Image: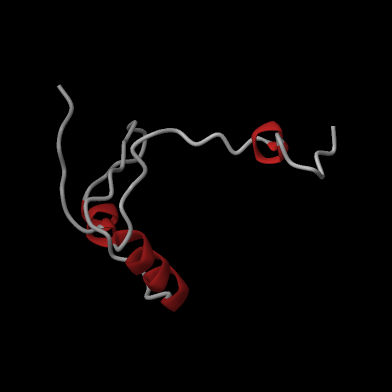
């Protein structure tokens, strides 16, 4: 049975001897340095409804039926 050790990365590395053990790291929070561009992108994404279906953005789909069809 695996042991669950939880805490901040810096504290865990200092206080537990993990050398020689297989570990899996799962980040539990979203702490990241503030990036204004990413912040505005997330705000934009949060203000739009997610797509409920797949979108065909292939070249064939984009240019089909147009007068400047490159095919």
Q: Is residue 2 left or right of residue 37?
A: left
> Relative to 1, is 69 above or below?
below
Q: Residue furthest right?
A: 71
> Relative to 58, is 15 above or below?
below
Q: Position of residue 5 (x, y in %)?
A: 16, 43
Residue at 30% x, 41% y is 18
Q: Is residue 70 left or right of residue 45?
A: right
The total of numbered circles placed on residues is 0
Residue at 28% x, 50% y is 27
Q: Dividing the picture into quarters, in which one does residue 71 lie?
A: top right
Residue nearest the viewer, comparing 17 with 11: 11
Q: Position of residue 60 (x, y in %)?
A: 70, 32
Residue at 70% x, 34% y is 64
Residue at 64% x, 34% y is 61
Q: Dividing the picture into quarters, in which one does residue 63 lie?
A: top right
Q: Is residue 14 left or right of residue 1?
A: right
Q: Position of residue 51 (x, y in %)?
A: 37, 43
Q: Which quarter of the rendering shows the N terminus? A: top left
Q: Position of residue 7 (x, y in %)?
A: 17, 54
Q: Is residue 12 left or right of residue 64?
A: left
Residue nearest the viewer, comparing 49 with 13: 49
Residue nearest the viewer, comparing 67 with 43: 67
């Amino acid at each position: 049975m695996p042991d669950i050790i939880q805490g901040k990365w810096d504290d865990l590395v200092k206080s537990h001897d993990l050398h020689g053990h297989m570990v899996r790291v799962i980040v539990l929070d979203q702490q990241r340095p503030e990036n204004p561009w990413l912040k505005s992108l997330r705000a934009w994404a949060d203000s739009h409804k997610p797509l409920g279906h797949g979108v065909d953005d292939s070249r064939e789909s984009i240019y089909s039926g147009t007068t400047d069809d490159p095919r």
